[in-house]
Image (cartoon, rainbow, N blue to C red):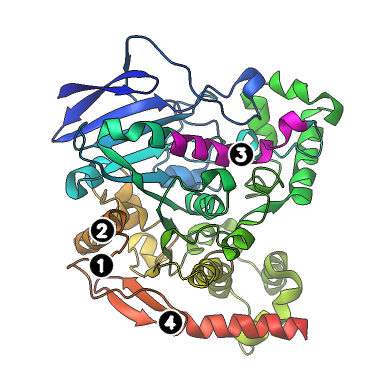
Amino acid sequence: MSQIIVESVYGRLKGEESDGVIVWKGIPFAKPPVGALRFRAPERPDFWKGIRNATSFSPVAPQPQSEIMEFLGNDTANMNEDCLYLNVWSPGADNQKRPVMVWIHGGAFISGSGSSSWYDGATFAAQGDVVVVTLNYRLGILGFLHLGELGDEEYATSGNCGILDQVAALQWIQENIAAFGGDPNNVTVFGESAGAMSIGVLLGFPSAQGLFQKAILQSGAAANVHSSAKATRVASRLLAALQVEPTNLSKLEELSVEELIRASTIVPMMSLGPVNDGISLPHHPEEAIRKGSAKDVSILIGTNKDEYRLFTVFDPEWRNADETKIHAVFEKFFGPLLPALAKQFSEKEPLNQDLLNQLLTMNIFTNPAQKLAELQLNQDAPVWMYRFDWETPVYGGALKAAHALEIPFVWDTLDKPDTEKLTGTSPERYPIANQMHQAWIQFACTGQPDTELLPEWPRYDLKNRTTMIFDVESTVVNDPNRDDRIKWNQATLQMKS
C-alpha cells in the first residue's frame, strides 16, 4: 500500500493506494461546528501547514442508537460533534477529469454516516473509472433544530444546517476535486432514504444550484420538508425539555451533546428534518422544481417494491393486535383519508399489516417519486425510473423487497461485513448487483443508465411511465404502479367530494 499526496485548496493531504484505487479519508470541508458555530451555517475550513494525514475516517455525527441502522451496517463507535469531513476514492490523482459521484447517506435525518463499510467507494472507482465522495452532515437536533422563529437572525437557517453542510461539501468538491482526478463540471449526487430526500431538497435549494448536473434518488424524493410553523413547534418542545428559554438560546451552546441527543428522542421519528425556512429554502422544493429550479438536472429515481416492511415486520405493536388496535394504527397514519383508502384498497377485506405496508410504501416513497418525475417532465428534463423487486430470503422472506435492501447492490458491496444479514447468501444476488452498479456508473458518466447488461431502458414519460424492474430477470414494464396510483387518486378525490 503506497502513499499519495495531493494539494487541496486548504493544504496537502496524504492518502493511501490499494489495488489501483487511492483513498483519502477524513478531509475537513468546513470548520468544526462546535461552540459558537453550533446551530449555525457551516464556515469554510481552516488552512493547514505541512501534510495532513488522510488515512482514517473521521468521527461520525452524534446520533442516538438505532437497532435498524445497526442492522444496516451503521457504526457509531466513534461519534463527535466535530464531524464535517468527507472521503474521496479515485483511480488517480491526475488530470483525467473523471465523473464524480457524491453519496449522501440515509438514516431518517438522525442516523448514519459516510464511512459505513457498505459505502466503499473503491468498487465504483475500480470498476467505473469514477471519483467517489462520501460525507457526513449534522443530524437530528444538531442539524435540523429550527430556531429561526424563536431567536434572532443568527439562527435564521438553523433548521437546515444539515442541508447547508451538504452544500458546503459540494462547494468543496467544486474547488478541490480536480486535484483528485475528478471533473467538477460532471458531478452526480446520489443517495438513499433521507439521503435521497436531501437531494430532493437540494434540487430546490438556491445555494446548491449549479453544484451538480445529475441526481440519483433511491427511495426518497422532494416531499419531506417541514413548514416553519411545524418545525417551530418541534423546537419549542425540545427547548422546554432542555429547560432553555427562547430568550436565552445561547445556553444551547453550553449543553453537552449527550443532553441534546437525549432530549431529541422525545419527538417522533422524522420530526427533525429540512425546513421551509423562507431564507436558505425560500420555497417548498416541489414548488421550486415546478418552476424549473432543476430543469438542467438529469434524474434517475426509484423505489423498492416493499419499502415499509423494514419498519413493521419486527414491530411488537403487531403481535396479537386485535381489530381495534389495527384500526388505531391506520388512523394514526392516514386520519380522515382512511375511509376512502379502505374503500378503494380493502372494501371487503379487514385492515391488516400487509395493507398498511402497501399504503405507507405508496404514501412515503412511490407517490412522491412519481410526483418529482412528473414535475421534471413538465420542464422537459430527462428522467429514468426504476423499481427494485428482488426479495431477500432472510427471516423467512418476511422483508421481501424492503427499504434499504438495494444499497449493497448499487454499491456492489454484497461481500462486505453484515450485508448477508439483510440479503442472505444466494448467488443470484451478484448479477443484479452488477446490473445496478454498472447502470449507476453509466448514468454518472453519460446521463443515461443504459448498459449491455440490461434491456433497453427508455426515458420515463407520462404516456408509458416506463420503469426498469430490477430482479433475478430484470425487465422493462410500462406503468407498473398503475392500479395503485389510480386507486389512491380516486380515494383522494372521494375525500374532497
Q: Is 170 in the magenta?
A: yes
**Tag 1 or tag 2, which sits nearer the N-term?**
2
Amino acid beneath label 4: Asp
Main structural element of the magenta stretch: helix, strand or loop? helix
Quick one: 166 or 392, which is closer to the camera?
166
Residue numbers of the magenta segment:
153-171
> Percent x, y for residue 286?
60, 62
Neighbours of disc 3 within 10 Å: few (<14), some (14-19), many (20+) = many
Q: Are marks 2 and 1 in contact (CB under 8 Å)?
A: yes
Q: Nearer the viewer, mark 4 or mark 2?
A: 2
> Percent x, y for residue 92?
19, 34
> Which residue bears the numbered disc 4?
479
Q: Are marks 3 and 2 in contact (CB under 8 Å)?
A: no
Asked if residue 161 lies left or right of residue 294, the reply is: right
Residue at 24%, 63% in the rendered image: 432
Note whether residue 256 is visible: no
Amino acid beneath label 1: Asp
Asked if residue 288 lies left or right of residue 71, the reply is: right
> Which residue bears the numbered disc 3?
140
Q: Tell me, for residue 442, which label it has, or none.
A: 2
Cα separation between marks 4 and 3: 36 Å
Residue at 13%, 35% in the rendered image: 19
Quick one: 90 or 263, which is closer to the camera?
90
Q: Nearer the viewer, mark 3 or mark 2?
A: 2
> Percent x, y for residue 346?
61, 85
Q: Is 18 in the magenta?
A: no
- Locate the N terminus by quadrant: top left
- Residue furthest to the bottom in view is 348
Asked if residue 226 lies left or right of residue 220, the reply is: right
> Which residue bears the numbered disc 1?
450
Neighbours of disc 1 within 10 Å: few (<14), some (14-19), many (20+) = some
